[in-house]
Image (tube, grey):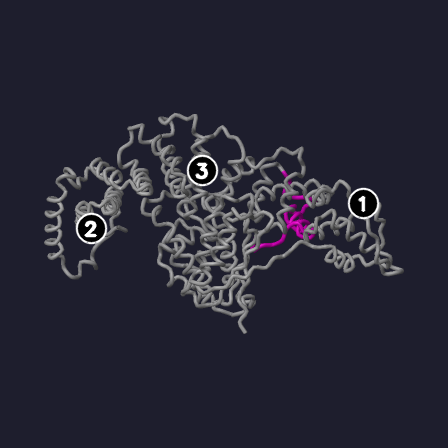
């Protein structure tokens, strides 16, 4: 019997702007199992990792492979073609920071990424089925992640066994939430059309009988009434949360509030003393903080630094923060960080999560660690700034979202530098089709430069407004997108080529509000500014269309049969922009009812293809 892998990914409240974070962690865990754990038989199928590498590399085109390698840590060890094709890719995932995305990449990013993820999971399932992906804390999942989960579940071409388990806190999800509506859509509609099953399991909080059973199992007393009384107090203090109950039980033991009698083999306690001692315990965070504050200063510093790094972190990254605060690297001639890691694991604060990676056992533990050593000056911004300047470029690209999130939680005088960081994060999010995140990063970058003159940061501001307008439009904030576009176009000191991306967004905005004629006029005007004339006047379009159509037919008749074998690809940015804009003209003219202008635009595209090569249009 084959035993497929069980892998998990967790979404993080403090990294809500990081797209696909939980899904990426789960896929990274699969990659790690393939490359490191196959010999031990942990996957159960004993699949040759070389065979999987070949299948994955063959299933994905180079551009799809490169897109995923930029995103998923460890995938470069499997998709060998993508690594060799792009020197900027680093083996742990990530590319050169600040890569500028072309217009066609922005427009087609959603479908490309979803298709690439589908092919990757489909290939993994073919070799490792049955496979289980467990995604925790879905209540904090971003919009893009929920859409991707939908896309993976509804893959009718995946004939292998795949189970996706999602866990979320029902008290943080209401009928207006995106997660609730996604579950309803999957359960009531797509499960029938796409032939999959949705099973919902409600895990209620502990009731009094559950807590009594736990108390009996751990603190057995001779008197049943004492067991029940302790259980009732435990339920009152923890509200039945299973994790809180466990932490409350640990606190009773560590505080010496329960005592084991060897002579009678039972536990004893003073209920009144427990009630008085825990009177101020409002929640489990207070319990954890009390336990943490008994640790050494170095241990508390370690936990606090780690808390700022997110739900998962690398010890090498934490070491950078540790050194920057002047903390010692050795104690009693021994490296201190390995000792602190062992302490944190032994005390059940963190657990191992791959090579040099660790994660908090619960988000409440991470929350408790934030308040340690309050007399030590440290803030999310300080941590983000340290990482921004200390990480090498490839590592910064991999952790870009987390670092920029930390920076954005503080105030900075280096507005231009960190506005650039927000632009990099926005462009990366846009390339991943995470438009909500892209809109937030671009908005923050714009706000950082609100008191900066355009003459000082001209290109940076243009890029931020361009990315911001595009992402705001996609998420439905048309008014904000138009404000960004007006801010740039009203200046009148940019060339048509410089604002081409913004013009494409403007055309899309007009199309979304059914202003097809206005969109056609915008395309024609911009093409004219790019020194490319489609028509002298819209009144002459019927005649120009007939002439262009006959000319195009004659040209095509002269094209040799093997033309497609030798045709190149357009790489010239201006020509690519002209083709993209002409393709938009072709569409909006057709929607406006001007079929002759639409045909004329199509002829122009054919002509440019014959002259310069292929494009995505």
CA separation in Å, label 3 and label 1: 50 Å
The boundaries of the magenta stretch are 327-356
Q: What element carries label 1?
A: helix
Marks 2 and 1: in contact by CB < 8 Å? no
Question: In the figure, is residue 539 to the left or right of 438?
Answer: left
**Nearest to viewer (mark 1 / mark 2):** 1
Q: Position of residue 83 (x, y in %)?
A: 40, 55
Near-viewer residue (532 or 200): 200
State the image quarter where residue 353 is shown: bottom right
Q: Is residue 348 magenta?
A: yes
| Residue corresponding to mark 3 | 422
Q: How crowded is mark 3: few (under 14 residues within 10 Å), some or many (20 or more)?
A: many
Question: In the figure, is residue 334 to the left or right of 134?
Answer: right
| Sooner in the amino-acid sequence: mark 3 or mark 1 | 1
Q: Residues within 10 Å of mark 1 (few under 14, many from 20)?
A: some
CA separation in Å, label 3 and label 2: 37 Å
Residue that appears at 25% across and 41% down: 574
Q: Position of residue 263 (x, y in %)?
A: 89, 60
Q: Position of residue 287 (x, y in %)?
A: 72, 45
| Sooner in the amino-acid sequence: mark 1 or mark 2 | 1
């Amino acid at each position: 019997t084959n035993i497929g892998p069980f892998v998990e990914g967790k979404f993080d409240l403090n990294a809500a702007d990081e797209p696909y974070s939980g899904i990426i962690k789960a896929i990274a865990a699969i990659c790690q199992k393939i490359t490191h754990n196959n010999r031990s038989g942990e996957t159960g199928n004993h699949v040759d990792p070389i065979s999987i590498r070949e299948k994955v590399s063959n299933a994905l085109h180079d551009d799809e492979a490169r897109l995923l390698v930029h995103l998923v840590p460890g995938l470069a060890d499997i998709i060998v073609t993508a690594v060799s094709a792009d020197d900027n890719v680093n083996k742990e995932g990530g590319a050169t920071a600040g890569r500028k995305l072309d217009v066609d990449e922005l427009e087609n990013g959603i479908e490309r990424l979803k298709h690439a993820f589908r092919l990757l999971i489909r290939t993994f399932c073919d070799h490792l089925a049955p496979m289980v992906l467990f995604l925790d804390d879905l209540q904090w999942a971003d919009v893009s992640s929920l859409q991707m989960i939908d896309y993976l579940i509804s893959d009718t071409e995946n004939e292998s066994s795949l189970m996706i388990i999602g866990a979320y806190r029902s008290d943080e999800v209401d009928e207006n939430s995106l997660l609730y509506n996604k579950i309803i859509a999957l359960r009531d509609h797509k499960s029938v059309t796409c032939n999959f099953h949705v099973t919902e399991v409600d895990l209620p909080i502990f009731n009094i009988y559950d807590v009594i059973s736990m108390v009996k199992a751990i603190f057995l007393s001779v008197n049943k009434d004492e067991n029940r009384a302790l259980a009732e107090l435990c339920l009152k203090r923890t509200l039945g949360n299973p994790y809180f109950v466990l932490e409350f039980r640990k606190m009773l033991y560590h505080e010496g509030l329960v005592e084991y009698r060897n002579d009678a083999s039972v536990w004893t306690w003073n209920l009144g003393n427990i009630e008085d001692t825990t009177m101020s315990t409002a929640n489990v965070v207070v319990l954890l903080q009390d336990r943490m504050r008994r640790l050494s200063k170095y241990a508390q510093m370690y936990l606090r630094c780690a808390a700022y790094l997110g739900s998962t972190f690398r010890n090498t990254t934490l070491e950078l923060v540790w050194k920057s605060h002047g903390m010692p690297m050795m104690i009693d001639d021994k490296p201190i960080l390995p000792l602190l890691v062992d302490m944190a694991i032994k005390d059940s604060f963190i657990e191992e999560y791959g090579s040099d990676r660790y994660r908090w056992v619960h988000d409440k533990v991470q929350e408790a660690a934030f308040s340690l050593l309050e007399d030590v000056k440290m803030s999310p911004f300080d941590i983000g700034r340290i990482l921004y300047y200390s990480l090498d470029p490839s590592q910064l690209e991999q952790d870009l979202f987390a670092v920029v999130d930390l920076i954005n939680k503080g105030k900075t005088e280096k507005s231009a530098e960190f506005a650039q960081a927000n632009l990099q994060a926005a462009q990366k999010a846009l390339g991943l089709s995470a438009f909500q995140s892209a809109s937030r990063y671009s908005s923050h970058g714009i706000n950082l430069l609100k008191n900066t003159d355009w003459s000082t940061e001209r290109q940076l501001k243009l890029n931020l407004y361009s990315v911001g307008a595009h992402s705001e439009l996609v998420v439905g904030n048309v008014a904000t997108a138009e404000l960004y576009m007006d801010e740039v176009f009203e200046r009148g000191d940019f060339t048509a080529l410089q604002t081409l991306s913004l013009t494409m967004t403007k055309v899309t905005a007009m199309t979304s509000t059914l202003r097809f004629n206005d969109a056609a006029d915008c395309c024609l005007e911009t093409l004219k500014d790019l020194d490319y004339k489609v028509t002298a006047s819209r009144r002459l379009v019927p005649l120009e269309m007939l002439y262009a159509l006959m000319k195009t037919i004659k040209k095509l008749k002269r094209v040799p049969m093997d033309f497609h074998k030798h045709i190149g690809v357009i790489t010239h940015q201006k020509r690519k922009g002209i083709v993209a804009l002409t393709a938009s003209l072709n569409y909006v003219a057709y929607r406006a009812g001007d079929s002759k202008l639409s045909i004329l635009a199509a002829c122009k595209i054919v002509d440019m293809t014959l002259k310069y090569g292929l494009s995505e249009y």
